[in-house]
Image (cartoon, helix red, strand yellow):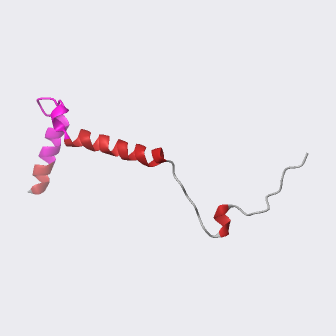
């Protein structure tokens, strides 16, 4: 049993490229971007430690020494 032979070339080789995305291929990245943006813009929900960690103090000292 032989395979059928294509008589017409595929769409991409005829000169025009026709790309059609499903609606969710655009909606999901937009939804993820908006969700991450809302998490960044709402710092009231973030519960940070009361004191700065030691690495932050070290970086402040390095910054002060290099600014002189």
Q: Is residue 53 visible?
A: no
Query: At x 75% / y 63%, what residue is drawn?
Result: 8
Judge left or right: residue 28 versus residue 43.
right
Query: At x 19% / y 39%, what residue is drawn?
Result: 42
Query: At x 47% / y 47%, what residue is drawn?
Result: 23
Count the labels in the image: 0
32 inside magenta stretch: no
Q: In what quadrant of the picture does the C terminus appear?
A: bottom left
Q: Quadrant of residue 18?
A: bottom right
Q: In what quadrant of the picture does the N terminus appear?
A: top right
Could you say where residue 32 lies in the image, as x and y percent from the top left?
A: 36, 42
Judge left or right: residue 45 versus residue 23.
left
56 inside magenta stretch: yes
State the extent of the magenta-drawn residues as a range. 42-62
Could you say where residue 5 lies in the image, as x and y percent from the top left?
A: 83, 56
Viewer-nearest residue: 11 or 68 = 11
Q: Is residue 1 visible?
A: yes
- Give the vertical position of 11 relative to 57 (above or below): below
Could you say where residue 34 lies in the image, as x and y percent from the top left?
A: 31, 44
Could you say where residue 52 lies in the image, as x and y percent from the top left?
A: 14, 34
- Give the vertical position of 8 relative to 59 (above or below): below
Judge left or right: residue 32 versus residue 68.
right
Residue found at the far left of this picture: 68
- Give the vertical position of 8 relative to 37 (above or below): below
Viewer-nearest residue: 61 or 36 = 36
Q: Quadrant of residue 11?
A: bottom right
Residue found at the far right of this picture: 1
Residue found at the far bottom of this picture: 15
Q: Quadrant of residue 44?
A: top left
């Amino acid at each position: 049993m032989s395979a059928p032979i294509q008589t017409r070339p595929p769409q991409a080789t005829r000169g025009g490229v026709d790309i059609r995305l499903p609606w969710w291929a655009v909606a999901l990245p937009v939804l993820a971007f908006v969700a991450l943006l809302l998490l960044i813009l709402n710092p009231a929900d973030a519960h940070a430690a009361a004191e700065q960690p030691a690495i932050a103090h070290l970086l402040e000292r390095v910054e002060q020494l290099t600014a002189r």
